[in-house]
Image: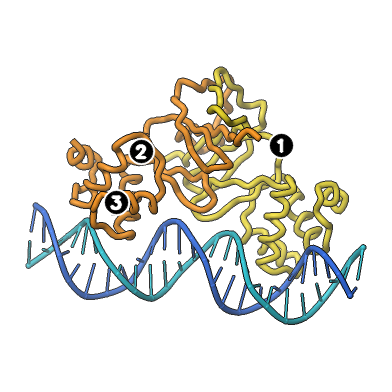
Chain colours: A yellow, B orange, C cyan, D blue
Amino acid sequence: MIAARLASHGAKPTSQRLKLAELVFERPQHLCAEQVLQAARARGVRVSKATVYNTLNLFVECGLLRELVVDRDRVYYDSTVHAHHHFYNVDTGEMIDIPLESVSFGVVPAVPAGTEQDGIDVVIRVRNRA
Amino acid sequence: MIAARLASHGAKPTSQRLKLAELVFERPQHLCAEQVLQAARARGVRVSKATVYNTLNLFVECGLLRELVVDRDRVYYDSTVHAHHHFYNVDTGEMIDIPLESVSFGVVPAVPAGTEQDGIDVVIRVRNRA
DNA sequence: ATATGTGCAAATCCTTTGCATAGAA
DNA sequence: TTCTATGCAAAGGATTTGCACATAT
């Protein structure tokens, strides 16, 4: 259940958090804060913009959401946190998940001295066919 | 020469643009607008913030610079426009180029219907070793 | 002349913050 | 109580914009 999921990640399951979590984790998706706010209100959830931001940031820290910094103007939150990749439509801004197994690497370079690998993100940019 | 390079990309080579281009294309680097402004002024170039933004945006449209949207707070401009990849240090925000040949792919998925591939960006996130 | 580039300051937009109130342990 | 979450409005910061002036063809 959602409450347990929050709790197991160290996020106190408050009323707003539960409602927002329900919405966000309903299916794999990429939403920005404004979309979460609108979707929440459309469902009659009473919540402020500040709380939406607080909550999304909290979820990111807890590892419940992944931040996607791909768009120039706003941050997207990915409800799929396990490793995977993305198509990014530069015309529409749309992001589509690519399962991890769909991309395989041959050579991968060694990381810079003093650092360790944190993850690999592959973004395949696409545009609408003319 | 720099002026010809701008001209060949359809950018009228004005005084400020030449100075900024000189600075930016001096070596492969990733700079944000503020850094370009500071660097320019440090060299005695008289230029406004608005012109820095105008110019960087123009260079991006011309294909002289690549926009890097990786940082939550600001856009970086990559003076290397040919295809390549990056290490991204999540602790420092530093970006390091990875030559194209250093990464090879096994499988790559087909792009979504109605779209065509525009490019592939691989970002290897690293963090400072504890 | 005529069109375009530049500088300045104000405007914009996403995101964060300060503070008072509400809610839970 | 005591601690934390929430809401609201204001603040913050990167980027854009409007407009007057400068510059170049």
Q: Is residue A129 above or below residue A8?
A: above
Return the residue nearer the eye: A22 or B121. B121
* Number of marks drawn: 3
Reading the image, the residue beneath label 1 is A82
> Disc 1 marks which amino acid?
His
Q: Name the residue: 85% across, 51% down.
A: A7
Q: Name the residue: 48% across, 21% down.
A: B102
- Disc 1 with disc 2 on a shared chain: no
Q: Name the residue: 45% across, 43% down.
A: B68
Callout 1: SS: loop
- Disc 2 with disc 3 on a shared chain: yes
> Residue D21 at x, y = what percent?
17, 71
- Disc 3 with disc 1 on a shared chain: no
Q: Are marks 1 and 2 in contact (CB under 8 Å)?
A: no
On what subunit does the disc labeled 3 rest?
B
Quarter occupied by residue B54: bottom left
Checking the image for residue B42, the label placed there is 3
Checking the image for residue B79, the label placed there is 2
Say left or right for C6 vs A8.
Answer: left
> Residue A119 at x, y = what percent?
63, 33
Which class describes the residues within 10 Å of circle 2: few (<14), some (14-19), or many (20+)? many
On what subunit does the disc labeled 2 rest?
B
Return the residue nearer the eye: C17 or B17. C17
Say left or right for A37 vs B43.
Answer: right
Q: For the residues marked 3 and 1, what is the alpha-carbon distance in whole angstroms? A: 45 Å
Return the residue nearer the eye: B26 or B53. B26
Which class describes the residues within 10 Å of circle 1: few (<14), some (14-19), or many (20+)? few
Q: For the residues marked 1 and 2, what is the alpha-carbon distance in whole angstroms? A: 32 Å
